[in-house]
Amino acid sequence: MTKNIIFLILFFSSLTRYGFFVSAQKTEHGNLFMESKFQYGFIWQHRPTLKEIIGGNIKVFDISIGKQTYGQKYWEQLYRYPSYGFGYYFVDLGNPEELGQANALFAYVDIPILRKKKYLLSYRISGGLAYLNQGNIAIGSHLNLYFDATINYRYRLSNHLDMITGFGATHFSNGAVQMPNLGINLFSYRLGLQYRFKTPVREFVKHELPEINKKNSISTFLATGIKEKRPEGGISYNVMSFSVDYLRLLSLKHKVGLGLDAFYDESLFETMNPDSSLNLNTSDIMRYGVHLAFEAELNKIMLVIHLGTYIHAQYKEDGAIYQKVGIRYLFTKNLYANISLKTSKGVADFVEFGLGYRLYWK
């Protein structure tokens, strides 16, 4: 393991210094860095069935490269000059036979809360793909989604070196693509170092922010996915959703609004009719809902949160309330791609992928 860590540090260092961010190094305020941390923590037993597989404490190593923004674009000023980048994550889950280890590749953004000359308090959000080398009663698939949220405190030791400490939560899930999918949730303390390859620029650029001319928008979105039902290794079913949202711009960062959903879930044919005694058609499994919407926009990335309830559905055994959390990427001002997770009662229902289009007016 020690040899692997040394190799990763050298590999990420070479990427940073010799070419991966060459264009960033040529910018006037470019400031690249490498960061590595060790984590120590535990697995949260959020279901009684997980007790039998949770062993000792978890041990984590992660390494990343990133860029500090200085206000070249106005969104950087809006978010108090965040940093962003990508990295590698490794965790020993404390039970080699049942849980094994996980490796993940992720992208992240680190957004300041309070910045002073010698220290920085921030929150960091990371997302990516993870590979678990052991299938178990918590997660049946090897390939999973990875999500991490952290509160970090960074203290400046020198012009090039910072100490980092923090506490965070990590989540692994396959979004019900394969059963079981109880998910694995980790909580850990983090300690590490950040090394900057250039002396940091002290002054941040302040822009005259643009006026908000078009505050209203309509967004339409079509998505598809697959889900598996118990027992493990069962049939995979197609799912689709269509949404229409009205959104009101509160600021250059945030929108709120209302929306309508339509869900098509083929697994309901079996769930509602396990003994095939009913003659169900497509209209019987369709579910329609209304939701509250929130969007936070960061350059070309949007974080989307929906909280909804069904207004017409023959099947509500999984709850009348549902949630969606997703990420959207803007190809143009109007066209975007989406990946989101739908949940009910805190359990993943399905992961969906799709395209959307939005229109603005005053």
Image (cartoon, rainbow, N blue to C red):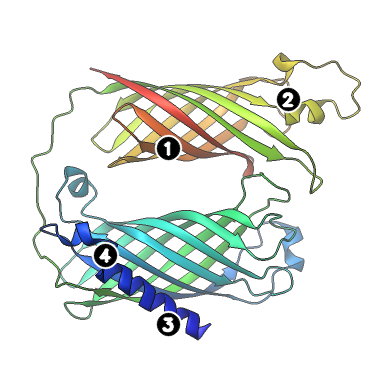
Q: Which residue is mark 2?
A: 315
Residue flagged by tag 2: what amino acid is it? Tyr
Q: Quadrant of residue 63?
A: bottom left
Identify which residue, 113 or 132, lies in the foreground: 132
Q: Which dot marks residue 6? A: 3
* Label 4 Cα neighbours within 10 Å, binned few <14 / some 14-19 / many ≥20: few
Sequence order check, earlier mark of 1 and 3: 3
Sequence order check, earlier mark of 4 and 2: 4
- In the rendered structure, the answer to whether residue 165 lies left or right of residue 278 reads left
* Label 1 Cα neighbours within 10 Å, binned few <14 / some 14-19 / many ≥20: many
Mark pair 1, 2: CA separation: 26 Å
Residue flagged by tag 1: what amino acid is it? Val
Element at label 4: loop
Sequence order check, earlier mark of 1 and 2: 1
Kindly tell me whether residue 191 is visible in this rendering: no
**Residue at image x 78%, y 39%?**
235
